[in-house]
Amino acid sequence: MITVIITALICSFALSVAVGLIIIPILRRLKAGQTIKRNGPVWHLSKEGVPTMGGFIFIVGMLITISAIGFKSLLDGEYAHFVMLLFALIYGIIGFLDDYQKVKKRVNTGLTSIQKFVLQLIVAVVFILLLRNMGYLTPNLYVPFIHETIILPEPLYLVFAAFVIVAIVNAFNLTDGVDGLLTGVTLPVAVFFVAVSVYWGMLAQGIFAAALTGGLAAFLIFNFNPAKVFMGDTGSLFLGGCVCALLFAFDMPLIFLPLGIVYIIENLSVVIQVLYFKITHGKRFFKMAPIHHHFEKSGWNERKVFAVFTFVSAIFSLIAWLGVMERYIK
């Protein structure tokens, strides 16, 4: 099993690097450049025109890897990795539609918030129902660290799961605001799922998580500051879909509380900023939200933001591992 997972990681990395070397020049020729918000940090204006939709780099790498290495498991009746991939791909398509509108109109807004919310919610509901039907998911909430289970009525669990998925995916989108940030923060999360897969002997989930890890490591080569390409909503929504897929395929969504601490803080910073702005009639709690921009405006350069946030993600991924490692130990 370990050999298969290592192979998946290496293949996804190599394929994603190859795709990156091919696709970035194509995106430049197509003038698929990022449009920068004028109300954002002024130093980000220099990024105008850097190719976006670079999420295709790791999406293609993962797609080929999972299809090739996971095919034998598929023949053996294990479908989890392909169900997760399909789910994440649909979110990637929603992100692509958003990116395409931005590039086509040369603005920083694509699909409306309502359009994205409705599309994401429908996909989430279908995914949860599919996992339940296939036996990967129960309507019960496993509580990490104390290893207890909260039994919920089926309809309540469905509503909870659907809205959790939408919230997480959008938190990923908010985190993608500094060169390499979302890539770096998500790498330890992906490694966590690889470790859990190996420890619990779950091959299909392990192949998926290893392919995600390899693809992200490869993308970081192109996305690290100064970025040669941005993942765009194509990549950020796909990554959010990947992590949500893993959370629910392992039937432990509550582990996201420690595991996804950076995404949660990024999301909360926006909520706090908006509420504080409305309550105080125009005052701001942070210098700018999401919170990574607050630190930028406080004097941190992008590499420091990347390093600190990635380190925090790594520490909390380790904490999350300690919280679930004894789940199946009797």
Image (cartoon, grey):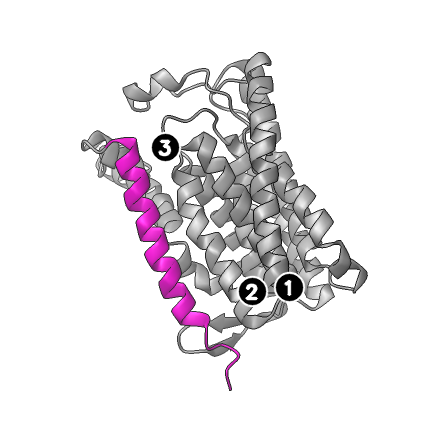
Please tell me the numbered disc located at residue 185: none
Image position, residue 147 (x, y; %) = 45, 78
Please tell me the numbered disc located at residue 197: 2
Q: Is 124 or 295 nearer to us in this picture?
A: 295
Residue at the image position 56 percent from the left and 29 percent from the top: 20
Residue highlighted by disc 3: 178
SS state under label 2? helix
Image position, residue 17 (x, y; %) = 55, 34
Task: Count neighbours of disc 2 (C-alpha within 10 A) and say few if under 14, some if 14 to 19, many if 20 or more.
Answer: many
| Start-end of magenta stretch | 301-330
Query: Disc 3 vs disc 2: Cβ atoms closer than 8 Å?
Result: no
Q: Disc 2 to disc 1, how far (Cα)?
A: 7 Å
Type of residue at label 3? Answer: Val
- The quadrant where residue 14 appears: top right
Q: Nearer the viewer, mark 3 or mark 2?
A: 2
Q: Is 57 or 9 nearer to us in this picture?
A: 9
Q: Disc 3 to disc 2, how far (Cα)?
A: 30 Å
Type of residue at label 2? Answer: Ser
Residue highlighted by disc 1: 203
Image position, residue 248 (x, y; %) = 57, 61
Please determine whether, in this image, residue 150 is positioned above or below residue 19. below
Task: Count neighbours of disc 1 (C-alpha within 10 A) and say few if under 14, some if 14 to 19, many if 20 or more.
Answer: many
Query: Disc 2 vs disc 1: Cβ atoms closer than 8 Å?
Result: yes
